[in-house]
């Protein structure tokens, strides 16, 4: 939780000071797996851990989804059954966007949306 700079201590001692400890004790186990890498002199170790946690969670979800059964599927996305809950992104007034596809692909690439709902107003034309 220390926010101080250790640059002057490094200079006085002639050795590098790394921020290898996490801010929260619950993160110690995960931090220990990182001991093979060089820690930052300015960024707390748990900031590195957040990326690792995201990657592990994403991998775990992919594995669970691979083993799940669905009631039906749409373009390979299993729906219902033992599959995980899906995230729906809505694009309101999609007909007013210059590039609907690019917007939808951005939602999918951001890692959040499984399904895109395109909303069209009464003023939409083919």
Image (cartoon, grey):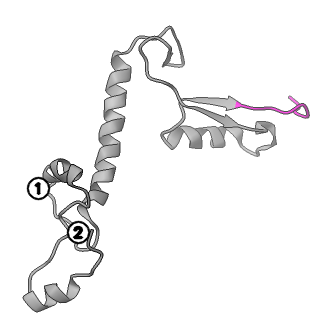
Q: Is residue 8 above or below residue 36?
A: below
Q: Is residue 90 left or right of residue 115?
A: right
Where on the picture, by quarter, is residue 13? bottom left
Instruction: Measuring from the top left, give residue 83's x and y in whole percent.
Output: 43, 18
Q: Is residue 35 left or right of residue 43?
A: left
Residue drawn at (22%, 60%) of the image = 22
Q: Is residue 6 left or right of residue 78?
A: left
* Residue 61: numbered disc: none
Residue reaching furthest to the bottom? 12
Residue drawn at (28%, 48%) of the image = 52
* Residue 36: numbered disc: 1
Q: Is residue 50 above or below residue 95?
A: below
**Count of picture labels:** 2
Instruction: Measuring from the top left, give residue 111's x and y in whole percent.
Output: 48, 40
Q: Is residue 83 left or right of residue 51?
A: right
Instruction: Measuring from the top left, give residue 1's x and y in whole percent.
Output: 27, 68
The kind of secondary structure element at disc 2 is loop
Residue reaching furthest to the top? 71
Residue drawn at (15%, 86%) of the image = 9
Instruction: Measuring from the top left, give residue 112's x and y in whole percent.
Output: 51, 38
Residue reaching furthest to the right? 123
Image: magenta residue range: 118-126
Where on the picture, by quarter, is residue 75? top right
Residue drawn at (51%, 41%) of the image = 109
* Residue 40: numbered disc: 2
Q: Main secondary structure of the magenta part?
A: loop
For this rendering, which residue is in front, 56 or 96? 56
The kind of secondary structure element at disc 1 is loop
Q: Residues within 10 Å of mark 1 (few under 14, many from 20)?
A: few
Q: Residues within 10 Å of mark 2 (few under 14, many from 20)?
A: some
Q: Is residue 67 above or below residue 29?
A: above
């Amino acid at each position: 939780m220390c926010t101080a700079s250790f640059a002057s201590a490094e200079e006085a001692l002639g050795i590098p000071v790394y921020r290898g400890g996490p801010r929260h004790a619950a993160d110690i186990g995960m931090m220990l797996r990182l001991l093979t890498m060089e820690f930052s002199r300015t960024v707390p170790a748990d900031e590195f851990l957040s990326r690792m946690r995201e990657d592990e969670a994403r991998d775990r979800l992919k594995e669970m989804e691979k083993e799940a059964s669905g009631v039906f599927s749409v373009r390979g996305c299993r729906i219902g059954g033992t599959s995980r809950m899906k995230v729906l992104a809505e694009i309101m007034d999609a007909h007013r966007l210059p590039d609907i596809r690019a917007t939808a692909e951005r939602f999918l690439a951001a890692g959040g949306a499984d399904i895109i709902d395109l909303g069209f107003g009464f003023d939409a034309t083919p």
